[in-house]
Amino acid sequence: MPNTVSELSKQWYTTSFRVRYQETDQMGVVYHANYLNWFEIGRTEMIRELGFTYREMEEEGVLLPVIDLNIQYGAPAHYDDHVTVYTRMIDFSPLRIYYEYEVRRLTGDDQNSLTAVVEEGNLSGERLVTGSSRHVWVNKDWRPTRLDKCVPKLYDALRTSLLGGKE
């Protein structure tokens, strides 16, 4: 299994939306904690793009709590901005998964050319926020569990996505 970022897949998964009024403060700036919700949306949609849902994972008996979170704020998003959350895995094992995120503001031209999966270096828009999160696979009793043993189809899909189809 690769162990450096340069060896990992360069694929970013995308999800886009407009900033809602409820996500902003009186100045029309997105409240800082909302970016964490957006990271979760990115993770959820990435898993969906790979053919699974969080509901299906939970039905299979695995949960994915956050064990570490990092976020860097560059520029604020504002009410009615069109933003995209770019999400990718940067490390993965049967016990843990590590995601990286970029939140970017898109212009009309950027919106028109956006696809569900993009390669490194092709991220559109103005970078606003970056971050990462680490998670551990646990069972319903909150004990660490091996994804390759509990949900091998999901493990294989994540591994293939991370490696970009390379073994």
Image (spheres, rainbow, N blue to C red):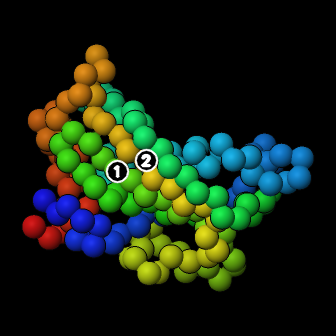
Position in image of residue 121 (x %, y %): 44, 81
For mark 1, does the 10 Å Cα neighbourhood hold few (<14), some (14 to 19), or many (20 or more) residues? some
Q: Is residue 76 visible?
A: yes
Position in image of residue 63 (x %, y %): 33, 30
Is 105 above or below relative to 73? below
Report the side of 72 relative to 133 (left or right): right
Q: Image point 69% across, 78% down: which residue?
A: 108
Closest to the observer, 158 or 70: 70
Quarter containing the N terminus: bottom left
Is 102 above or below relative to 24? below
Q: Image point 64% across, 74% down: which residue?
A: 126
For mark 2, does the 10 Å Cα neighbourhood hold few (<14), some (14 to 19), or many (20 or more) residues? many
Q: According to the image, label 2 marks what residue?
A: 133
Specify the label residue 89 is tagged with: none
The quarter of the displayed image where residue 16 is located: bottom right
Q: Amino acid at mark 1?
A: Tyr
Q: Amino acid at mark 2?
A: Ser
Position in image of residue 56 (x %, y %): 32, 35
Q: Earlier in the sequence, mark 1 or mark 2?
A: 1
Q: According to the image, label 1 marks what residue?
A: 98
Quarter containing the C terminus: bottom left
Pointers 1 and 2 in contact (CB under 8 A)?
yes
The quarter of the displayed image where residue 113 is located: bottom right
Q: Is residue 45 visible?
A: no
